[in-house]
Amino acid sequence: MTTNPMPRPSDKYIPWYIVAFFVFLTVLFGWFVYIAEHTYTGVVTDEAYEKGLAYNAVIAAADAQEKMGWGSSLSYKDKQITFSLHDKQGKPVTGATVTMWFYRPVHDGKDSEVGMKELGAGVYAAQQLPSEPGLWEIRVLAVKGEDRYQTSKRVEF
């Protein structure tokens, strides 16, 4: 008993299922491209090539800072950022010019610079806070004469 296989009526739609599958994938990938292009914040490094060439100077400055032996602590309490600086022997470093920068790792254009005032005994403070709450990187540069010291810390405001 042999039966002659007859195509089912729904078999004529199989090529259209394949076409619909690829149309669906094309629309999905197009949506991904749209999202990628319209949500990119544009955070890039300006003059990346020049900064890359100057990287040996950055390494030399880091070595000089390490040999200097200065140390610091950075804290945030009661809407005030406090930076304390001490030398190799643990004595406070006074009379330095201290500048602090707020960097937002995820947004471009929100960065700001603040000068810190010396409270005494190597302690410097600033009352200004970032423009909006969230995770910020605080970078501090202290300059006294020819000596330069810098540090950074991530803080949530």
Image (tube, grey):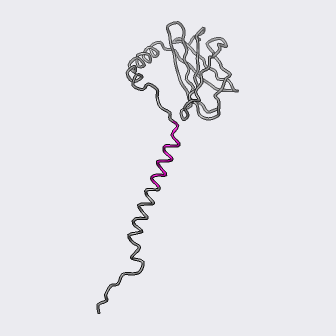
Name the residue at the bottom extreme.
1
Name the residue at the top extreme.
145
Give the residue drawn at x 63%, y 15%.
123
Viewer-closest of 151 and 53: 53
Name the residue at the right extreme.
78
Q: Position of residue 73 (x, y in %)?
A: 58, 21
Name the residue at the left extreme.
2
Viewer-closest of 2 and 128: 2
Viewer-closest of 27 and 139: 27
20 sits to left or right of 70? left
In the rendered view, tell whether residue 46 sits above or below residue 41: above
Give the residue drawn at x 37%, y 21%.
53
> Which quarter of the figure has residue 156?
top right
Q: Position of residue 145 (x, y in %)?
A: 53, 6
Specify start and end residues of the magenta stretch as a single range: 28-41
Question: Is residue 33 rendered magenta in the image?
Answer: yes
What predominant SS class does the magenta segment belong to?
helix
Q: Where is residue 136 in the image (x, y as percent from the top left)?
A: 58, 31
7 sits to left or right of 43? left
Quadrant including the C terminus: top right
Viewer-closest of 23 and 94: 23
Total labels drawn: 0
Q: Position of residue 81 (x, y in %)?
A: 64, 23
2 sits to left or right of 50? left
Quadrant including the N terminus: bottom left
Question: Is residue 17 rendered magenta in the image?
Answer: no
